[in-house]
Image (cartoon, grey):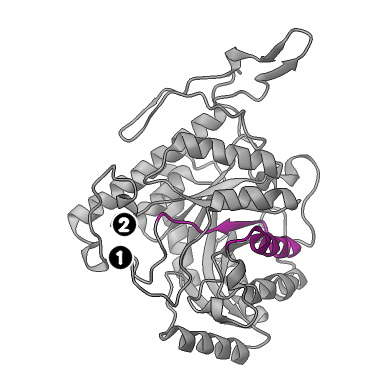
Amino acid sequence: MTDSTPLHLSVALEGAGWHPAAWREPDARPSELFTAAYWTDLVHEAERGLLDFVTIEDGLNLQSDDLFEPDERTDRVRGRLDAVLVAARVAPTTRHIGFLPTAVVTHTEPFHLSKAIATLDYVSGGRAGVRVQVAARTDAAAHFGRREQPRLSLERLDDPAAQQWIVDHFDEAADYVEVLRRLWDSWEDDAEIRDIATGRFVDRNKLHYIDFDGRWFSVKGPSITPRPPQGQPVVGALGHAAVPYRLIGRSADVGFITPHDAAQAADILAQIRAEQQAAGRAADTVHVFGDLVVFLDENEQAARGRRERLDEAAGEPYVSDAEIFTGSPAQLADLLADWHAAGLTGFRLRPGALPHDLAQITRALVPELQRRGLFRTAYPTGGDAGTLRGVLGLPRPANRYAAA
């Protein structure tokens, strides 16, 4: 492994795991899903494996097996904690790992999220980010009552009206991120004077109006929170098609994609790089991570047996938007190396069941990658290396409002 081509690794934490029957596993902790201790233990395990960051899933509606409608099932995990608040609770108990909690940007306000993520950056010592997500369901819109939301389905996704809705909502997400970034820059780094002798705490000339006036948002600024330690916390986004790939290319620092082989990964990567160039960001580092759901055991037979047991408990085979890997850590290392060679800079692994598959990642996959020279043996130190941007090799951006 060279410094110019590190393999980055993260995990996506979701309830008891990504398989809907994971909460019924012998080592699951379903009675603790809404406790701080549960999430703290998971993140500490991820940090033990030297992972770059964790993402934490969130939403504005109860989970459902149907992508577009609520269901009435009672044999699935239903309900969740706020991802940003969970991250803020857990972050001070860690030293190195980053946090990208999910935030739905369709029905929320960027001013609120900007100060929440800036606060997370402060309490984590510069290890914060956010995964922005668009909400597509009518039941989520009904919680707010501010807009009409068309009822979507897989069959309607190709309709011109549905396609326009998708374009509009991802364009709105891009504006949302732009407002976030401007608000994070609205305080210059040295705006706080804290001079007891003169009684001046802040230099008001170094707080700036952002005066954003767009189709969806009109935000005056400045923020009420000083510029975050990283300057700009890391922004991530998940993409499955051309429109969200545009959001990644235009607005994100880290994009998550769901290819099913190395060739598809390379094709998606090319699309994102083209969107980067079109947005004038060709010189910027935008990491592209491949998402995989993983069921890991000592050998493939054991992993398949466990997945089949979970499917039987769920009453149906598990399906996902991402590729589902079932096998040994060595086999997964082979796949990651193959996709990494295709151009992906990292991976976001979705543990099928928690804590089992997370421990398999940290205690079996990571050592296997280390033996192959594909992953770090310690967190970087010194300078900005202790920040999430430092771990990801992203420079600390200059403040757009500061005088040269």
User: Taking the image as drawn, is residue 240 in sight?
Assistant: yes
Q: Residues within 10 Å of mark 2 (few under 14, many from 20)?
A: some
The mark tally for this picture is 2
* Quadrant in the picture for residue 200: top right
User: Taking the image as drawn, is residue 286 in sight?
Assistant: no
Question: What residue did someone put label 1 on?
Answer: 69
The answer to the question of whether label 1 and label 2 lie on touching residues, with beta carbons closer than 8 A, is yes
Q: Is residue 128 left or right of residue 281?
A: right
Q: Check residue 267 for magenta coloring.
A: no
Disc on the earlier residue, 1 or 2:
1
Q: Nearer the viewer, residue 284 or 232?
A: 232
116, above or below 259, in the image: above
Q: Which mark is residue 130?
A: none
State the extent of the magenta-drawn residues as a range. Answer: 34-60
Assign a secondary structure to mark 2: helix
Identity of the amino acid at label 2? Asp
Image quadrant where one finds the N terminus: bottom right
Q: Residue furthest left?
A: 160
Assign a secondary structure to mark 1: loop
Q: Nearer the viewer, residue 336 or 383?
A: 383
Image quadrant where one finds the C terminus: top right
Give the percent coordinates (x, y) of residue 363. Answer: 74, 73
Question: What residue did someone put label 2 on?
Answer: 139
Q: Is residue 306 left or right of residue 393?
A: left
Identity of the amino acid at label 1? Glu
* Quadrant in the picture for residue 155: bottom left
Give the percent coordinates (x, y) of residue 210. Answer: 46, 24
